[in-house]
Amino acid sequence: MSRPLPGPPPSAAAGTAWHVKLLAGVLGLALAPVLMGTPEGQRGLLALCLLGLFFILLIYSPRAGIPWTLAYLAALGGLRRWLIPIFGWTPMDPLLLVSPALVMLYDANLLARRGLPARTRLSRLLVCLLALMTLEILNPLQGGLAIGVAGALFYIVPLLWYFVGRCVGDAALVRRLIRVAIGIGILAALYGLYQTWFGYSAGEQEWLRLSGYTALNVGGTIRAISFFTSSAEYAHFLCVALVLLWALWLRGHRLVLLPMPLLALAIFLESSRGVVFSVLAACAALWAVQGRRTVAWLPRGLLAAGLAVTGLVWSLGRVQQGEYGVQTQALIEHQASGLLNPLDERHSTATQHSTMALDGVKAGFTDPLGQGLGATTLAAAKFNSAGGSTEVDVSNMFVSLGFAGGLLYVAIIGVVLMTAFRYWHRARNLAALAILGLLLLELGQWLTGGHYAASMLIWFCIGALDRLQPERETAS
């Protein structure tokens, strides 16, 4: 049985929350006349109010605060676009700072009360990684301190959710997050399909014009982004919801089959190819580990993977024979040609992405001290640096942190996966299967800072896993 969620002593929690509310109120009243005249100021006041609300929720009721924070991060992109007709647009949006400030405040409160948990092998490795990342903020090779600080928002902030999960994550809270993530995924799919077939709203069209986000254009068709910050985050979160539904089905919840076709259709029409293979591999792996004996997992996995690939090829052949509207046709042709010809550079970018990842790992040895924490983030491009993402978190770590940081991150991945498999093998419950599925699905993207909601969910669940596994061993 899981321990009850540990909360701060009433006096400490009340005192901290009271000071935050008081500070937010005073700042809001003092700055309102000055700030309300600019988009940054208007959005900043809204961000300040949201920060106070989420922090109070997180302190007093983690079971409510954490799901609401996940929902906020998922809808962050849509919220920023929907506010354009009211507040105008600014690329340096204070709403982006709500989650970083929230998790830093919570971890600082945790550190002040009893220290960050560092009793397990994983927690000690993560503390070492965070220390190295902090040093790399100052690396001059990345192009300036501003890029390093921005890199901290992409890489350090997601890792801080581990300590939240390590502190309050239990099986019940993980199950609640599963339901919330599935609900978000279904709503995202519905809105994304609406965008695909009926187009963007006026505010979203204005955002497209102002931001210059060209990655949504596929053969002259603008693909869906739903309410996420990017099409990539949208696609990945749809896959998260689908894999979580699959985990529920494997645990005997038969009705969860109903929304699966909706999510599958939205994933396909989003027109990203890599996530299709990822979701098939994750679902095959979850079915494979249903075997009671670990020696049966590999043959079951190979069988499931073979059936999945065969089914995909057959389905794509059938889809290509159909006739569709102009909007849908371009997306289907883009998707089918890339999936059926993954090694053909005329139809697929798989070879290009593999080369980028391999070059990133090599860079960790040619620049053994790393190129700086922000060198592989969007901040590098924004501040005119020569850096750029390798699109895989492992190779990004080799570039940003050097070979020592890259190897340290690989060790962390290994420890997490071994813990997840061990926890599933012993517990055989929904939380264990869902966490394992999430980790396998997003392998290579655990630390993609632009995937705000997915990164928060992953590292919170890793923290919960690190807490739950010792509990299971003690119970055994």
Image (spheres, helix red, strand yellow):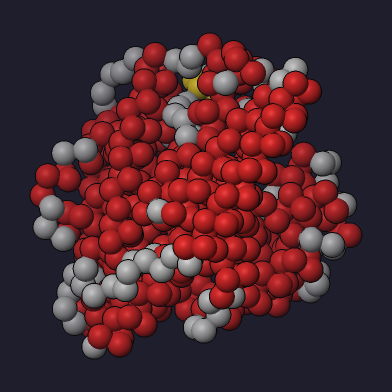
Q: Toward the viewer: 265 or 130?
A: 130
Against 166, residue 158 (above or below) is: above
- The quarter of the rendered structure image containing the N terminus is bottom left
Give residue 282's position: percent from left, percent from top: 33, 59
- The quarter of the rendered structure image containing the C terminus is bottom left
Against 261, residue 343 (above or below) is: below
Count of marks placed on residues: 0
Q: Toward the viewer: 396 or 177?
A: 177
Give residue 401's position: percent from left, percent from top: 73, 68
Give residue 471's position: percent from left, percent from top: 33, 80
Q: State whether residue 314 appears in this view.
A: yes
**Which residue appears at 48% of the width and 67% of the height?**
9
Q: Toward the viewer: 105 or 74?
A: 105
**Which residue appears at 49% of the width and 20% of the height?**
221
- Decide if residue 310 is on the left or right side of residue 17: left
Q: Toward the viewer: 18 or 274?
A: 18
**Which residue appears at 56% of the width and 75% of the height?**
114
Q: State whether residue 449 appears in this view.
A: no
Against 126, residue 348 (above or below) is: above
Against 360, residue 325 (above or below) is: above
**Which residue appears at 30% of the width and 40% of the height?**
183
- Decide if residue 81 is on the left or right side of residue 314: right
- Decide if residue 37 is on the left or right side of residue 283: right
Q: Quadrant of residue 390?
A: bottom right
Give residue 141's position: percent from left, percent from top: 87, 59
